[in-house]
Image (cartoon, rainbow, N blue to C red):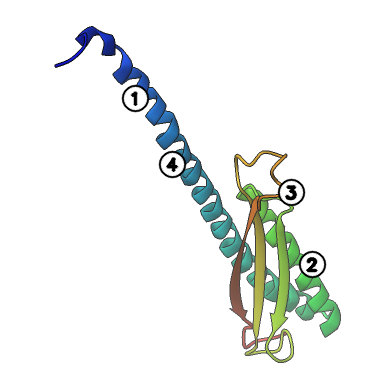
Amino acid sequence: MSGDPRAADGSATVEFVALTLVLLLPIVAIVVAVTSVQAGAYAAEAAAHAAARAAVVTGLDAAGDGADPAHALALGEADAALAAAWVAEDFGFAGQEALALACEGACLAPGTVVTARVTVEVPLPGVPAVLRAVVPSTVTVESLASSPVDGYVP
């Protein structure tokens, strides 16, 4: 054994703290980013489902109240946008969602399907404002949901 054994006193503590900072902080940052993206995926899925169903239910209700098909569809689309916005807000992504509705055949005709596509922009936590212009700081998640139009239209 060479040298004085007391010369290394405390170096293990310093090495442990340094390795903790170097290894643990990036792992925590990755876990936080992944959970944010997963929350965005849940938000997109729930918003798409709510929007598709809201479009069908509101459109059929309006048609049942005597609205012409174009007006009933417009009311359904407006309610679908509102439903998607509410769900996105509940998940913490207010104003970061985009909705697109599509229909197979004539919208709101019995037996057709209304499909909602919701896209959510998920900001990655911990990206400094200085780097946002250079480094991608958002992840886009998308979900599709379909809702059949019931066979009965008043």
Q: Amino acid at mark 3?
A: Ala
Measured as percent of width and height from the top left, residue 112 is found at: 65, 88
Nearer to the camera, 109 or 84: 84
Q: Amino acid at mark 2?
A: Ala
Q: Amino acid at mark 1?
A: Phe
Residue 100's image quarter? bottom right
Instruction: Specify the label residue 149 is tagged with.
Output: none
Nearer to the camera, 5 or 90: 5
Mark 3 = which residue?
133
- Seen at 78% across and 75% down, the residue is 62
Quote the CA–CA distance across marks 4 and 1: 16 Å
Question: In this orientation, does residue 65 appear?
Answer: no
Measured as percent of width and height from the top left, residue 45 is found at: 57, 64
Side of 17 where 128 appears, left or right: right
Quote the CA–CA distance across marks 3 and 1: 35 Å
Measured as percent of width and height from the top left, residue 20 is found at: 39, 30
- Seen at 55% across and 54% down, the residue is 37
Indicate which disc, 3 or 4, sits on the residue closer to the N terminus: 4
